[in-house]
Every structure is written in structure tokens, then in C-alpha cells.
Image (cartoon, rainbow, N blue to C red):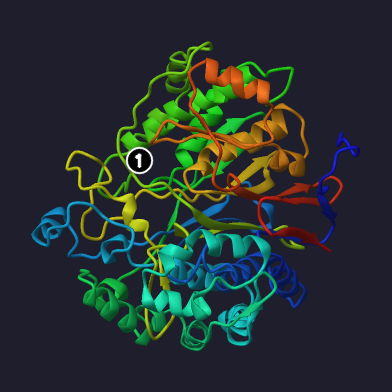
Amino acid sequence: MRDLSRPGRSPVHSTKAMAATSHPLSTQTAIRIMQQGGNAMDAAIAACAVQCVVEPGSTGIGGDCFCMYSPEGSAEPVAFNGSGRAPAGADPEALAARDVTSIERHSPHAVTVPGAVDAWARLQADHGRLQFGEVLAPAIEYAQNGFPISSRVHCDFEGQAEFLRGDPITSAIYLPNGEVPAVGSTLALPLLANALKSIAEGGPDEFYRGWIARDIVEHLQGLGGFHTMEDFASASGEYVTPITSEFRGRTIHQCPPNGQGVIALLLLNMMKQLDIDPAGPLTADRIHLEIEACRLAYAARNHYVGDPSFSDIPVDAILSPDYARSLVDQIDPARAADTAPDLALPRHRDTVYISVVDEDRNACSFINTLFFGFGSGLTAPKSGVVLHNRGQGFTLDEAHPNRIAGRKRPLHTIIPAMATRDGRSSLCFGVMGGQYQAFGQMQFLTRHFDFGFDLQESMDLPRFMADPFTGEVELEDAIDGDVREELVRRGHEIVVPAAPVGGSQAIAIDWQSNVLTGASDPRKDGCAIGY
């Protein structure tokens, strides 16, 4: 039972439909679309398109998209992988010939062909009710007429301001007069509005075969990229079969690799091997165990997970109970392990996650990303499309499953998820924060199912995570000082995160009472709304 003596928002309840996103304008858009006759898929895509405008540092049409969709609450959700591929001409030898020794963020080589627009169009055509143009209309309106800068968006702009100043096109758009837009000021994006209008009227071909593709390709080629019009014309996401694991009487569904959903399931399998601490999830003992589990699971991720079209990913072995037990057995309950990362992959910054359930109980778990804040920082000059930096998920290491190759997809961190129970979908959820997402899903689910916190409390509780590359442990301020001291004594290097750790949204479906319960992370500007 929620402790109402503590400050904080409560979960949201409704009977017909609900949406939860990280921005109020996005959530309102999703609700409006459903009230106008659209379903959960229409609403999720419309909300995401709005976020590509009003949260431009977190996501955009120059990014990638993954989705899990449960038609009418089916226990067998469909999953779509909308991650982009490297240009056909990109391989280590070609990069070496241009004296490229690493894939830098502000580089054309960090840009794979964006998969988001293709994913939106495919999913909307297959599962939506409205016309594609109707779904994109709210985003076009905000881009054309302007939108207010919210507090968290302003903070995100400030965090990337110096980086943005390094690109004249991007800075001219997002730093008017050379300054970060103030909270409550308005910003219009007319170039992006025109691009969205073209996509609304001409469909995804405008992005992948028309003037928008030419704009992006010419810009990237001018910077030394390998991208061609053929790379864009051949871009296509795919439906994939979800992978699953059982946890506390529920089946947890994830997209398979090249995403890290398999690691979220591995972490849950590891948690099943541990005792539930009666003192709660924020004791030194529990935090220590979760940190150590994080290090081991992410070491497995960095070693195994990549594009299954190019290498054999041992998903069944990773998800076996014996493998989870073998990792848990390596944890010393009294001392932090000195676990070195396998690979210096990049740390992640920004993504948006959207959860929508409609009147027919179609449930949509939807995630869209630029990877870092404002992605690569490269913006196509005529279309205003900010391009992601997912190509930094590649490595030049010839022995690694994420070695770059033509038409290959990099390791992805974004993972929409769904839980089912008794033959129906029961929880539509996701976590933002890149590397944190797999670990964050484990924290959210264990706090809810193991420790009895409601959906909102499970998001509100302080977070922590072991950085999979530096070994440092990011601990949010609200964690008790005595706990911090004990973790340091056990050998953990504690640091204060530069920004709140992650974000999340969730909607639970109670089929017996016909009530939806939603929650939205307080670390973002967003909210859950139902009707």
C-alpha cells in the first residue's frame, strides 16, 4: 500500500485508455489521437513524432525505433526491429584507408541509415487505423508553429550546448542567437516541419528515396561518409520473434539481439537466484548484489551481443538457468569484483519511451532514439534532420561480434518490453537511459514484484548502476549516506551521476476490474494520462 505521508505523484487510473510518455505534449497527443478514433499504435507513433520535435535532443526522425505490440491484449506480442544498418561501403578496411582508427561521435561514420521512419510507416500501415498524415499532423503543427521549452528539455540543451556549438548547422537551429532557449520560451523548427509534411504526404519514400534522402546523403558524403542513395533506398526494418523468460509468474517479452533485451532477461534470471532482502531494495547488501550482477551481465553483453545476421548470438545459452547461476556464484557478497570491460563501447545519453493501451486493450511498447543527446550532432541542412550516432555501437576490433561491416546493425541499447500473465498482456513498460535500460528494467520489475512497491514508487525510488566500461558506480543522491560508506568499504568507486539516472513509463492492465494503471518517471517532464 502506498505511503501517502511521503511526497510524490501517485499512479494514474482509468478504464478506457491510457498513455504514458516523457513529455506532457506527447502524452496529450496520444490521448487526443485515441479520442479521435485512432488505436494504441496510431497514438504511440503520433506521440513519438511529437517528441521528435519537442524533445529534439532525445529523439528524432534521424534515429532508430523498436516496438512491441500486443493486439487486443494478446499473450503473444509482435516485435519490430527498426534499427538502421551501416552503409554498404563501410568496413574496417575502407575506414583504415581514410585513416579512421575509431568511430567518433561527430563523424559521418557514426551515422547508420536511420530506421525510425520506415518502422513508423510499416507499423502504422499494419496495425494502425488512421492515415499516416493524420498521425504526423500534431508533430508538424508543433514544428511549424513552435513549442514551449520545458524544464528538463532546457537542462538537456544546456548539457549539450558546447557540443552543439561545434556544428554550424545544428547550432543555428537549436541555439538561436547562440544561446540555449530559456525555460518557457518557444522554439520553431520550420525545416523539420517541411520534412515531416513531405513524409506525411508522400510516405516513407520521401525520407528514403526522395529529397530528404538526397539532403542527408549529400551532407554525409561531403563529410567523408560512405552513404549512398542505394543505402537509403534499401533500408528496411523487420518483424522479429520476441525472446522470453519467466519472472514471478509472468512471462517477460523482449526484442532479440541486436538489442540488449536478452541482458534484461539474464538479469531477471539472476535475481531469481537471490534472496529478497526483507529490509528493502536500498540496503547496502542488496545494492552490492545488484551492482555485481550488473557488471557480470554487461560483460556478457559486451562479449556476445551483436547483429545475428553476422554472428551467432547464443541467446538460449545466455538465458539458461545454469548460466544465471554460474554468474551469481561468482559474486562475493562482501567485496566488489575487479571486472574489466571487454570492449570500450560508447556510453549512452538519450532516448524516449512511450507506453499506450487503448479501449480494445491493444498495448504498444514503443521506443525511439538518437543514442547520445542530439546524436552525432550532424544535421542535414535542408531537411533539418538531426542524425543519430548509433554507429558508435560498432568497433574496429576484428574479433568482436560488433565489428563494423557493410549493411550490419550495431549493438542497440533500446528495448521496449511487455509482461503477460494468464494468456493476456498485463504490463506494458520500458526504461530510458541507454546502457541503463536492461539493468533499469530489472530494478523496476524487482521493486514492483519482489518488494511490493506500486508502479510509480518503483520508478521514484533512488537508482544506481555500475558503469559497464569504467567500473564506477553511479548512485543518486537520495541513497542513504551510511549505505554509501558501506559500499565504498566493500570496494565500490561511488560517483554522483551528472544527470538523473534513466527514465521510464509503464501501464498495467487489470483484466478483472477493467482498470488501467499508469506511471511516468519524475526524472523527466512527462506524465501518464488516462480517460
Residue at the image point whose x is 24% and y is 40% from the top: 400
Say whether residue 271 is left or right of residue 512. Answer: left
Determine crowd level at label 1: few under 14, some 14-19, many 20+ residues with C-alpha closer than 10 A: many
Kindly identify the residue that appears in the image at 51 percent across and 65 percent down.
Answer: 57
User: Which image quadrant is residue 134 in?
Assistant: bottom right
Q: Nearer the viewer, residue 505 or 120?
A: 505
* Residue occupying the point 82% across, 53% down: 12
* Place of residue 24 in the rendered image (x, y in percent of width and height, measured from the top left): 72, 66
Question: What is the number of callouts on the image?
Answer: 1
Query: Above or below — where is 133 with respect to 252?
Result: below
Q: Nearer the viewer, residue 166 or 238?
A: 166
Frontmost residue, 61 versus 266: 61
| x and y percentages locating residue 371 in the rendered image | 44, 57
Quadrant in the picture for residue 221: bottom left
Q: Which residue is mark 1?
A: 305
In this picture, residue 263 sits left or right of residue 92: right
Does residue 415 appear anywhere in the picture?
yes
Q: Is residue 524 above or below residue 191?
A: above
Going by the numbered disc 1, the residue's amino acid type is Val
Residue closest to the eye, 442 or 230? 442
Query: Which x, y percent locates residue 223?
Result: 23, 73
Residue under the image location 56 percent in, 18 percent down:
273
Whether residue 319 is visible, yes or no, is: no
Question: Residue lying farthest left?
Answer: 97
Quarter the N terminus occupies: top right
Q: Which SS class for mark 1? A: loop
List the single residue furthest toward the front: 178
Residue 36, image x, y percentages: 75, 78
